[in-house]
Amino acid sequence: MTTSKTAAQPEGRSLGGELRKQLKDLLDGGQAHATFEQAVKDMPVKLQGVVAEGLPYSAWQILEHIRIAQRDILDFSRNDDGNYREMKWPEGYWPKDPAPPGADSWQKSIDQIRGDRKTFEKLIDSVDDMNLIRPFPWGSGQNLLREALLIADHEAYHVGELVLLRRLLGVWKS
């Protein structure tokens, strides 16, 4: 690895800028697996609330869990006013009913996940490099970089579950 001050650096790029780009790409997912968009696309309404044999959750419950957890991480990360309140685990993060409450619930949940992801990406862009890694004054040492990685890791795990569930239900088109 070259460490001299004359080491080549791509024009107009910095470590912080590249890190932000990679974080946003990671949040969008799909670099090594199916994306969130692929996992939720065209899920038949009649199967959104089905719990496949041997699995603990329906697609709806997984989708809502992704939404709730991502929103919780977003709220935690922008807690400058000190109003964030931790939810009770696990009941605060998982819907009890396996079926969506309404015909438009599936799409509303997807739209909120997308919107909250965009808001989180704006939060990443709104801080300087030090504030990306500086521990929040609240919590137990978390920082914005860690929370971005947590969102991406959490969503990737549950996207995998959605793909598996869809395979078991016979509605996955790879």
Image: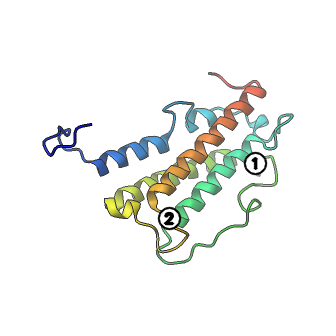
Please state if 55 lies on the left or on the right of 115 as rendered: right
Q: Quadrant of the C terminus?
A: top right
Q: Callout 2 environment at 10 Å: few (<14), some (14 to 19), or many (20+)?
A: many
Q: Is residue 28 visible?
A: yes
Q: Earlier in the sequence, mark 1 or mark 2?
A: 2
Q: Amino acid at mark 1?
A: Pro
Residue type (three-letter) at the residue carrying disc 2:
Ser
Which x, y percent locates residue 82?
53, 78
For the residue pair 33 and 52, the one nearer the viewer reads as 33
Q: Residue at x 48, y 53 (%)?
A: 148
Q: Vertical placement of 116 versus 36: above or below?
A: below
Distance from disc 1 to disc 2, alpha carbons, whole Å, reads 28 Å
Please give the residue where the numbered disc 2 appears in the rendered image.
77
Q: Taking 8 as reference, is 143 above or below it?
A: below
Q: Is residue 36 left or right of residue 91?
A: left
Q: Image height check: is 38 above or below 59?
A: above
Of 28 and 4, the residue lying toward us: 4
Quadrant position of residue 50: top right
Q: Secondary structure at mark 1?
A: loop
Q: How many marks?
A: 2
Label placed on residue 100: 1
Give the residue at x 85% y 36%: 54
Q: Name the outermost residue toward the bottom.
A: 82
